[in-house]
Amino acid sequence: MRRAAMALLAKQISPPNLSIMQDEGFTVARVRTELLSGLTVALALVPEAVAFAFVAGVHPLVGLYAAFMVGLITAVFGGRPGMISGATGALAVVMVALVAQHGVEYLFATVVLMGILQIIAGVMHWGKFIRLVPHPVMLGFVNGLAIVIFLAQLTQFKDPENTEAWLASSQLVMMLGLVGLTMLIIWGTPKITAIIPAPLAGIGIVAGLVIAFGINVPTVGDMASIKGGFPAFHNPFGTGEGLYGTALAPFTLETLWIILPYAVILAAIGLIESLLTLNLVGEITGKRGGASQECIAQGASNVVTGFFGGMGGCAMIGQSMINVKSGGRTRIAGITAALFLLAFIVVASPLIEQIPLAALVGVMFMVVIGTFAWNSFKVMTKVPLMDAFVIVLVTVVTVMTDLAIAVVVGVIVSALAYAWNNARRIHAYTRESESDKGAKVYEIEGPLFFGSTDGFIELFDVAGDPDHVIVDFARSRVVDQSALQAIEALAGKYEAEGKSVVLRHLSRDCHQLLTKAGHLMVDSDDDPDYEVAVDYSVKTGVLGGH
């Protein structure tokens, strides 16, 4: 039994593609591009990780360690080279209540459980369900996330000592000027040279000007000190005092019931954001990624992070866009970004803390411009009204709540719209039977499912029909239990009138569905292949409906 279970598990897990360069040629120019792209991403990760740590109510190093470990592990084992992962705002907002009520050790325990759930999702290949996300939802997701990234940068224009107030007018003007200069450099650099990634050039030149001329604008160091050591192993389970003066999480069922709801929500949000980012990066680079491999990598990274004092994370669309736009295409860029970030924490914090936030904000503003699907305005005038509505709905819900809720809402609305459109398609053509004299044939068109059952029943004139009726499903499909119930109800109505009804031209899947339910009086495999037109009488009372 145990050996069979292990064999089944081994069959579920396909060998991952862990090639460093994938199908990119190994050249000096390629390696240089990947290294510089990684450095650019690492610089942009610092303020993001610190800001998200503040959102979650934890120490800045908790966010920075998460960005390093999640970024490194997913870069090595993830399903889409070029993606960048780390601490994200979508996860941070869920963590606030848990940290406030139970402390940071419960957060670490939750991140471990979150990772285990994500690994299970990967092993079970649940990542493939991301294919069910319609394109209008993807457009809304991209637009909403671009707006969220833009709004998140506005906090950098606030006074570091009083986050409720904007910077003084002189500082604000200087900040805006430096942001504009950074954006101009990023726009112009590719026209001059491709040796240095444009975002890195923007950060380097603006930081050099600020340091050289002693310009008084907020810097990374004004947010918080990023100085720290190497992340050390830390077991969040047990008794006594843990990190940052909070109590450890007892390894009990009571703890499980506390952290399980948060872990489920975080795992779902993390996977949705990661898989949507995987698809987006794949569209830009023209390469497919492994959804299940990405799920397992995200899960493994979170399990490790939870045991090393990190807040957990998932794919970051903003940083992924910086990497892709800077030329990053392989695992080298993601690995480099994580290692540079660790170097910033351990040895280079005094230098990194001098970087003006204006330069990093300028980079993120260019990411917003590049991420937002500007063609969606044109698309919405040409697609069906419901698809345009879904694009706007997902965008608004992403901004107002969070990404996971927005995607779920978008998928549900799209599914309901699809069901409604299909429900309206069902109709029937009637004629006299050529093979059975005096019988009436109803040729059904359109799928028979929960949304179309009422319309299906209304197609028939039970009282006015002859004694023998044939329902022809050559151009229809019996889809679900509601359809079975409708067929049984129809047969019951004819039976009550002393008339007979038979089914003809069932497809193989319809035949199997009706046979399993016990509705078919004749069990034959001829009809699904249409070699012999078998008529099936319907057995009533199977589902209790008449």
Image: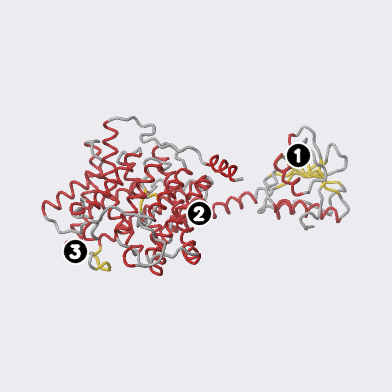
- In this picture, residue 450 sits left or right of residue 61: right
Q: How is the image coloured?
A: secondary structure
On the image, the x and y values in percent for residue 462 come to 82, 53
Residue 169's label in the rendered image is: 3
Q: In the depicted view, which residue is nearer to us: 387 or 289?
A: 289
Mark 1: amino acid: His
Mark 2 and mark 1 in contact? Answer it, CB < 8 Å. no
Mark 1 or mark 3, earlier in chain: 3
Residue at the (87%, 55%) spot, across then down: 497
Residue 410 numbered mark, or none: 2
Please state the total of marks drawn on the protein image. Answer: 3
Residue shown at 36% from the left, 34% from the top? 21
Gap in angstroms between the C-alphas marked 2 and 1: 37 Å
What is the x, y in percent for residue 143? 40, 51
Is residue 426 left or right of 112 when viewed as pictured? Answer: right
Of pointers 2 and 3, the one earlier in the residue sequence: 3
Q: Name the element at disc 1.
A: loop
Identify residue for label 1: 505
Q: Which mark is residue 205?
A: none
The amino acid type found where label 3 is placed reads: Ser
Could you say which quadrant of the image residue 416 lies in?
bottom right
In this picture, residue 103 sits left or right of residue 439? left
Query: Which residue sits at x=31%, y=59%?
Result: 51
